[in-house]
Image (spheres, rainbow, N blue to C red):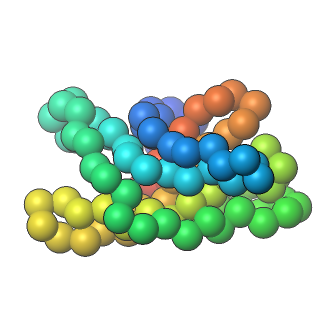
Amino acid sequence: MTVKERDNRIDVICQHTRDGRIIPLKIRVKDEDGEFQTFMVQGYRDLTHPGKYTLGNGVEVSGCMIKTYECKIVVFGVEKVIRIYYHSTDNVWREVRSE
């Protein structure tokens, strides 16, 4: 299965700061049963850098179009770190999946 065949789009509530930064606050994803689950972002790290680079799942991206974040969420009482990215041309948030 290629990345394009998977639907890894997610809903994100974020804050746009006046200096142009984007801060992810809350995410909503579909679980394996197709139900939506909502998680507060407990902490995040902006992994975006200028130029081309490759995400963990092999997708090559350009820093000017894609903002990449590592986010801490709590799932059933367990802290989990996920990676998400925002594609500014498409205005779509996606979860980076390495499956």
Residue 82, percent from left and from top: 41, 62
Q: How many marks?
A: 0
**Image-based side of 38 in relation to 45, left or right:** left
Residue 24, percent from left and from top: 50, 51
Residue drawn where x is 62% and y is 65% of the image = 46
Q: Residue furthest front?
A: 18
Residue 72, percent from left and from top: 37, 67
Residue drawn where x is 49% and y is 66% of the image = 44
Residue drawn where x is 42% and y is 34% of the image = 11
**Image-based side of 28 in relation to 3, left or right:** left
Residue 37, percent from left and from top: 22, 40
94 or 74: nearer the viewer: 74
**Image-based side of 54 in relation to 1, left or right:** right
Classify 38 as above or below 78: above
Classify 76 as above or below 92: below
Q: Quadrant of residue 7?
A: top left
Q: Is residue 8 visible?
A: no
Quadrant placement of the C terminus? bottom left
Q: Quadrant of residue 88?
A: top right
Residue drawn where x is 51% and y is 43% of the image = 14
Q: Is residue 60 visible?
A: yes
**Image-based side of 26 in relation to 16, left or right:** left
Classify 55 as above or below 26: below
Q: Residue furthest left?
A: 76
